[in-house]
Image (cartoon, rainbow, N blue to C red):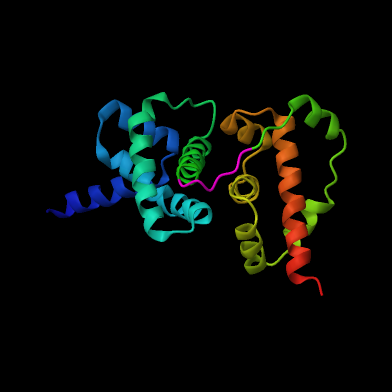
Amino acid sequence: MGLISIFRAIFNKLSFAKASDETLISEYLLTQENKYFDTLYNRYKDKIYGKCLSMLSDPELCQDALQDIFIKVLLNLSTFKKDSKFSTWLYSITYNYCIDVIRKDGKLMTDSIDDTKAGNQLADINNIEEQKLLEIKVERLDKILDAIPVKDKSILIMKYQGDLSVREISDMLGKSESAVKMILKRAKEKSLRIYDEMYTE
């Protein structure tokens, strides 16, 4: 390979690294060249693996999940709507995939929430619980999350690790925003109750 070709390859690699997600998607859909999708994969694979691990707690299962999720993304990339961020769409696929795995394994408990009742109960949500959660040390928080139901753990991870808004979570779960707020509130209450049981002397 000549010197010019080497420099061109380095320049192209740097250009891919700086390109926006949307640009990479557009170029891939236009050209079907793997280099664009590979850049997206390398950009997000560690984050997606981490999210899978936080929900599934099985490294081998998470490796399989990572591959399955990106295959799903690849097959559905043409349906991605640019009115939301690619990362939000990708995290949505990840969370739904992990929840499906957990449900098939029989670990996911489901309950229904009356949206109207939830909305009435959430006229004034107290932020004290959230502040307490944020003050808990990471290693203790991991133990607490492992001790609560998977559905509660999942929604807390979406909100505080995935940094998703209530609206984004409601879209992902197919629930109203008031219902999501209620689920979050109950999940925080359970977490703090378990924290008190574990660490309060």
Start-end of magenta stretch: 105-110
Q: Is residue 7 above or below residue 179?
A: below
Q: Position of residue 67 (x, y in %)?
A: 34, 46
Residue 124 magenta: no
Q: In this view, does 177 lie above or below 136?
A: above
From the viewer's perspective, is 163 left or right of 2?
Answer: right
**For the point 54% across and 25% down, which residue is it?**
83
Q: Position of residue 104 (x, y in %)?
A: 45, 42
**For the point 77% across and 58% down, which residue is it?**
193
On-image quarter of the C terminus: bottom right
Q: Residue furthest right?
A: 124
Q: In this view, does 123 lie above or below 18?
A: above
Q: Residue furthest bottom?
A: 201
Say if residue 160 shows up in the picture. Answer: yes
Which of 43/186 is in front? 186
From the viewer's perspective, is 156 left or right of 199?
Answer: left
